[in-house]
Every structure is written in C-alpha cells, then in structure tokens.
Image (cartoon, grey):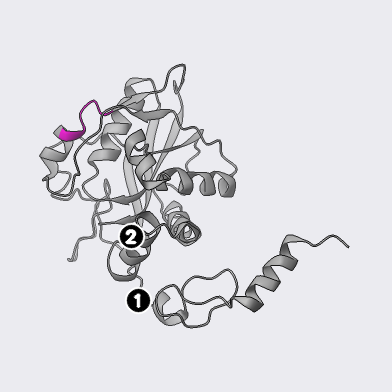
C-alpha cells in the first residue's frame, strides 16, 4: 500500500509530539499555541483608527483617524491588523522572520485571516494578492521573504491569484531608527512595478507581516495606484 501524507504526519506526531511554541506544553496536531498562551495573545479591538488600525485607549464611538495618520498622505485605502505585536505575537513573528522557524508561517497566516474578517475587508472583492517585496540582497541574506510566504498561504486559502508585481529596487537602511516622516523619505522610490506587470483597474490586497507606521505599505500602494490600481487595501498579521 502507498503511504499517504496523513500516515507520515501520524508517524511524525508519535516521534515528535506537537508542543506549544512558547511554553512547550502539549497541543493538538496542527496547533502552535496551547490554550493558556493563546489566551495571552493581544487582539486589537475597537476603538481603533479606521485608516491604520492603531488602537486607542478611550471611549471613542465614532470613526476617527489617529495621530499616526494625521498631517500626512497614506496611499492605501485602509490597513487592517487583527493582533497587537506585543508579547507572544511579537515573539512568534520574530522567530518566524529572523529565527528561520518557517513552520510558524501557518500560525502567522491564521492571524492574517483574522484580519480579513474585519468589516473594512470582509465584503470586499480582490483581484490579486500582492506581497511587499524585499530587496534581493536582503532576501539572499534572510533566505526568504516572509511577506511572500504569507501571501502564498493566503492565496491558497482565499483562492485568489498571487501576483508579485512589485520589486524593491533600492536598498534602504533599517527603518527602526527613523520617525514616521523619515521613514517615508527613506522609502521614496524604493519600489517599482515589475516590467510588463499590469494592475490597471485591479483591486489589490497588499500583504506584510507587521505594520509599524504604514510607510512601507503606503509607498507600495502609491506605486500601484499610479500604475492604475483601482483600490489598494492592506492586511498584516500584527500592528506594532
């Protein structure tokens, strides 16, 4: 008899019982967090900025824009995150992104799916999923592009075309030391549309792992809209 993939998974689970990626407690096959650690994951709940999902500690009940979005132009229509990049979420994403624990993409992608249930995205139709690209030098150093892995997973989940139409053409210094205006300047002209790529009249869903100020997503959205995209929404697994 030919061994099936489920057979091999069953053998693997006997030899290497699945455990929580945080505390090593036993978990069900296909799970990455135990119930106790799952309960510590910080979900973004209202009120939050309608444009960039920045949470607000207050009693606002109307739609509002946060200080992060004030006094600057953000080219995406909205950027949606379901979880806060704190504690366990941040730990998981850092291990996935820099620790080469690529299997964690499944968990991070589930957080992305949660973002898609937000009312800003839930009823929308998209023509393409577009990952945020890495500069080739950085991708060679890291070995993969985390946004591309997430976009591939989401493309299969949503049965939507994956279109890596953007490329990063300028190597930029790390964004972590910059404020929001410096981040936008640092990224200016860092991206362009790939040769022969056509996004005219397309409804695009941009994908990345974490949104910090939104500068990277905004610059990519600007390139797409200048190339004729009808709309550009963004989804990330977490919001810094």
Residue 98 is situated, as x and y percent measured from the top left of the image, at 34, 56
Q: 172 left or right of 18?
A: left
Residue 164 is situated, as x and y percent measured from the top left of the image, at 46, 32
Quarter holding the N terminus is: bottom right
Q: Earlier in the sequence, mark 1 or mark 2?
A: 1
Quarter holding the C terminus is: bottom left
Q: Residue at x 30, y 27 (%)?
A: 169
Look at mark 2 in the image and give the residue it sits on. 94
| Residue 43 seen by the camera | no
Nearest-to-viewer mark from 1 and 2:
2
Look at mark 1 in the image and give the residue it sits on. 40
Residues tagged 1 and 2 counted as in contact (Cβ below 8 A) = no
Q: 207 left or right of 180?
A: right
Q: Quadrant of residue 189?
A: top left
| Residue 208 seen by the camera | yes
* Classed neighbour count for the residue bearing mark 1: other residues with Cα under 10 Å, few (<14), some (14–19), many (≥20): few
């Amino acid at each position: 008899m030919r061994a099936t993939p489920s057979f091999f998974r069953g053998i693997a689970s006997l030899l290497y019982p699945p455990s929580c990626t945080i505390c090593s407690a036993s978990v069900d096959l296909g799970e990455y967090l135990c119930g106790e650690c799952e309960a510590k994951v910080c979900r973004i709940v209202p009120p939050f900025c309608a444009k960039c999902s920045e949470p607000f500690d207050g009693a606002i009940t109307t739609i509002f824009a946060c200080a992060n979005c004030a006094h600057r132009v953000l080219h995406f229509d909205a950027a949606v995150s379901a979880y806060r990049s704190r504690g366990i979420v941040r730990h998981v994403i850092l291990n996935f992104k820099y620790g080469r624990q690529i299997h964690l993409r499944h968990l991070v992608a589930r957080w992305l799916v949660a973002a898609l249930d937000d009312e800003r995205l839930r009823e929308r139709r998209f023509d393409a999923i577009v990952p945020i690209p890495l500069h080739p030098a950085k991708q060679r150093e890291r070995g993969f592009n985390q946004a591309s892995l997430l976009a591939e997973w989401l493309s299969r989940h949503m049965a939507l075309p994956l279109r890596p139409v953007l490329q990063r053409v300028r190597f930029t210094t790390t964004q972590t030391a910059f404020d929001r205006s410096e981040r936008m300047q640092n990224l200016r002209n860092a991206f362009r549309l790939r040769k022969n790529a056509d996004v005219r009249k397309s409804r695009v869903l941009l994908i990345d792992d974490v949104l910090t100020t939104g500068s990277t997503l905004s610059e990519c959205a600007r390139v797409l809209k200048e190339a004729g995209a009808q709309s550009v929404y963004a989804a990330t697994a977490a919001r810094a």
